């Protein structure tokens, strides 16, 4: 895809990703987070990482011959960056290493995995 195609896909892809990931975060994040944090996380975390995954990384890889490398980088980057951002915004010293932190990171990773899998299904159906 050329840059214009990437930019035109961005709004659809972002909203689809938010629609998939937000319910997972709603139910998956630890109970210590308010409903406002859960909803905010669904929109904010995707807003922080999705442009890099969709606009930047595709320009660094040949999407035909290096698709696997792109997927490995993109799908590692997104959950790691989102876990870090979430921790920086909502983590506490008391929660470090606790079950709640693990639950939050698992929910973020699971949400990313779910949106990745749907993306792969959509890619296969094209």
Image (tube, rainbow, N blue to C red):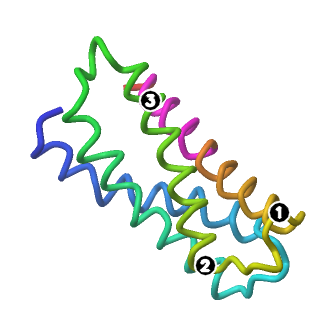
Q: Contact (CB < 8 A) between labels 1 and 3? A: no
- As drawn, the label of residue 20 is none
Q: Residue at x 24, y 47 (%)?
A: 55
- Asked which secondary structure carries label 1, the reply is loop
Position above or below: 123 against 114: above
Q: CA distance from mark 1 to mark 3?
A: 29 Å
Determine the residue positioned at 37% across, 52% down: 13
* Magenta-highlighted residues: 114-124
Up-down relation of residue 16 to residue 66 (above or below): below
Q: Residue furthest front?
A: 93
Q: Position of residue 97 (x, y in %)?
A: 83, 63
Q: Residues within 10 Å of mark 3 (few under 14, many from 20)?
A: some
Quarter holding residue 12 = bottom left
Whether 115 is among the magenta residues is yes
State the residue position of label 2: 39
User: Is residue 88 placed above or below 112 in the rendered structure?
Assistant: below
Local SS, label 2: helix
């Amino acid at each position: 895809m050329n840059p214009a195609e990437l930019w035109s896909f961005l709004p659809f892809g972002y909203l689809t990703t938010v629609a998939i990931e937000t319910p997972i975060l709603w139910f998956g994040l630890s109970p210590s987070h308010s409903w406002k944090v859960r909803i905010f996380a669904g929109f904010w975390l995707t807003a922080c990482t999705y442009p890099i995954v969709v606009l930047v990384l595709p320009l660094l890889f040949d999407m035909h011959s290096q698709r696997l490398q792109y997927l490995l980088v993109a799908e590692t980057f997104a959950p790691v960056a989102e876990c870090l951002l979430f921790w920086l915004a909502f983590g506490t010293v008391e929660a470090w290493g606790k079950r709640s932190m693990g639950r939050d990171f698992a929910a973020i990773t699971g949400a990313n995995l779910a949106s990745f899998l749907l993306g792969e299904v959509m890619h296969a159906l094209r």
